[in-house]
Each structure stands twice: as C-alpha cells, then as structure tokens.
Amino acid sequence: MNNHHDQQAQNAGGIATLLQPARRGTLSATDQPRIGEQWTGQPETYYNLPLLKKAHWGWEIITYFFLGGVGGGSYLAATLADFFGLKRDQPLVRAGRYLSLACMLASPIFLIMDLGRPERFHHMLRILKFRSAMSLGSWGITFFGLCCGLTAAHQMAKDGLLNWFPFMARTMRALPVKAIESIGALFGLFVASYTGVLLSSTAVPIWARAKHLLGPLFLTSGLSTGLSALSLILSLGRFKGQHDTLERLDRAEMITTTTELGLIVTLIPILGPLAKPLFRGKTGILFTIGTIGGGLLSPLLLKLGWRMNKKATSRSLTISASLLTLIGGVILRAVWILAGRISADNPRDIHYYNALERP
C-alpha cells in the first residue's frame, strides 16, 4: 500500500515537472502540480533545454540576403530605365545589368557556404514545393540569375566586349531583351522579398508575428539598397546627363526609404512585447543607430535638406548617403537574424505568440 502511494506521489512530481516551465532546473516532486498556463513564475527552459532551436545562420546568410536585395532592386531600376528612360539613362541601364549579375553570381556562393555542401542546393532544385519558401526561393534565384545573365550578355555585346566571338555577339544582340527584362523584373522582386517571407515561415515568435510585413520590408530595403548602389557607381564616373539621372535616382530612393521607415513603425504595435530584441539591448542599439538613424533617416534628411535649399545634390553627398544606406541595409538583415535568436531563446515570447495565434 505504501509503495502504491509512493508511486502516485512520484507520478505527480513527474507531471509537475513536465507541465510547468522550470525556474532554475526542474521542479521538485513536492511542488503542487498545475496546468502549465497557470504558472506565474519565471519560465526559462523545458528540462533545461530551449523550447525552440534557434537559427544558426551567420554572416554568410546575412550577405546572401543583402546581395539578393541589391540584385533585385538594381535589376528593376535598370529595367524601368530601359523601358521608360531617356537615351542618357543608358549608363544606368548598363550599371544595373552588370550589378545585378554580379550579385546573383556571388549570392548563391554564400548560400552554399552556409549549407556546407554544394549538392544541397542542387537537391533543392530536384522538386518544387509551392508551400515551401526555401524551395520557391531556390527556383527563384535560378531563374532570376538566368535572366540577369542573358541581359548582361546582351549588354556586353552592345558594349563590344564580345567582338572576339562574332557569332556569340550577334546572337546576344538579337535576344528579345525587353521580354527577358519583364520576366526578370518579376523574379527580381520575388528574390528581394522572399528572404523576409522565409524568416516569417518559421516558428520563431518575432519572425512569425511579423509575417505580413517582413516580405514588404525586405523588398523595400532591397529596392533602396539597389538604388543606392547604382547611385554610388554612377557618382564615381562621369557621363553626359549624369546630373539628371542621379536626380531621378534620388527621388526614387527617398520614396523607398520613406516606405521602409513606415513599415518599421508599423511593426511596433503589431509585435508588441515581441519587439524588445529590435529596440533594446545591443541589438536594439545596432538597429536604432545603424539602420533607422544611419541607414534611413540620415540619408533622407540630408537629401531633403539639400533640396529645401534649392541646391543640386552634390557628388560627395550622393556617395555618403549611398554608403550609409548600404550599411544600414546590411545591419537590417543582421539585426533580424540576431533578434530571431533572442526570441527563440525566450520562453515568454513563445508562450505570448502562441496565446495570440490560438484560434
């Protein structure tokens, strides 16, 4: 009989340990068993293990995200300039085509470096899953890279870089480049935005809660960094009509920067307590100063102030603003990955998100 009571007490202790989050280790068998949702203590771990496995992503994925955004943004800018621009915008078209190709040649390399084995990227192309952001992203990168390669080859033929191979030069000049650009621009928009969707498709609370805004945020960041990269490249050279082209790029940058700021402000009420990693601690300082202050507000205020004085944007100002925007774009992606790690390690974030999403 005593053995039976001892067994019941042991089972009760096991249930308490299983259902209740631990404060510093597991609960003792003498604690009263309760339902886990009623626990008012300080939840930390589940059997001394995190409730979620945080992302291991490092600088390789941050670079991969950044280059994908710059490639998509610069390709779209070059396509629009080719469709609706003037003859003097041809340097912008040329720079956008070459820049997007360079980004799409380098971007998969960093992805493969993170995957560890090159064949893993190949395996993702064996099937197409429409409900998998990773699968769609792999196919999107492949098709976008193909479009970048074809338009860059067409530009090389126009620039005389393929004259050593006459047949290839004639073939590349004969490509229906505007049709390729139309398709490529759509894939470029997808590549620039899908990385945000990829984050939001996980169980990490801060990423999952921002599922409706991460895609648009990464897209606008890709557009602003792509435009800034083109402004930086064109500012370093000299060509006819340079001032007018840079002025149009400036106006487009201000629109995308303002949109990006608006999306960040919108995140605050949506995330609620989940937004702490973005605005507190070392990560919060990096995000506030590096992205919001340095990468968005500073370039925007510099350009607005210059325009209010009715002065043409100087070359040094364009270079400085472009560099700030590019640095802010890198920091934006780094901060979101770091914030995701913090959120995955915090059981309170997990319980809070689960309570919000419970039907």
Image (cartoon, grey):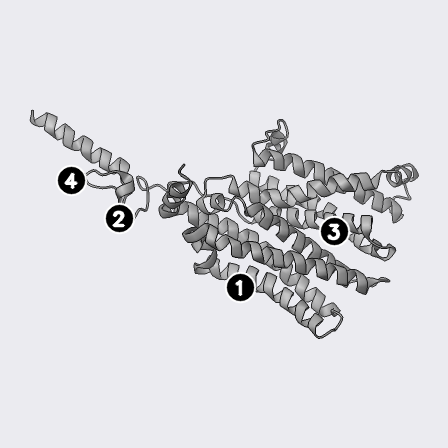
Residue 113 percent across, percent down from the top left: 59, 42
Q: Label 2 to label 4, Cα distance in Å? A: 16 Å
Residue 359 percent across, percent down from the top left: 41, 36
Q: Label 1 to label 2, Cα distance in Å? A: 35 Å
Is 51 displayed left or right of 3 in the figure?
A: right
Q: Which residue is mark 1?
A: 289
Residue 49 percent across, percent down from the top left: 35, 41
Q: Residue at x 20, y 38 (%)?
A: 33
Q: Residue at x 62, y 37 (%)?
A: 137
Q: Secondary structure at mark 3?
A: helix
Q: Amino acid at mark 2?
A: Gly
Q: Label 3 to label 2, Cα distance in Å? A: 53 Å
Q: Amino acid at mark 3?
A: Ala
Q: Which residue is mark 4?
A: 30
Q: Secondary structure at mark 4?
A: loop
The mark nearer the N terminus, 2 or 4, is 4
| Other residues around mark 3 within 10 Å, as few (<14) / some (14–19) / many (≥20) | many
The mark nearer the N terminus, 3 or 2, is 2
**Numbered label attached to residue 41:** 2
| Other residues around mark 2 within 10 Å, as few (<14) / some (14–19) / many (≥20) | few
| Residue 63 visible in the shown view | no
Q: Label 3 to label 1, Cα distance in Å? A: 28 Å
Q: Are marks 3 and 4 in contact (CB under 8 Å)?
A: no
The mark nearer the N terminus, 3 or 4, is 4
Q: Which residue is mark 3?
A: 77
Is 306 displayed left or right of 84 in the figure?
A: left
- Which quadrant holds residue 3? top left
Q: Amino acid at mark 1?
A: Ile
Residue 339 percent across, percent down from the top left: 47, 51
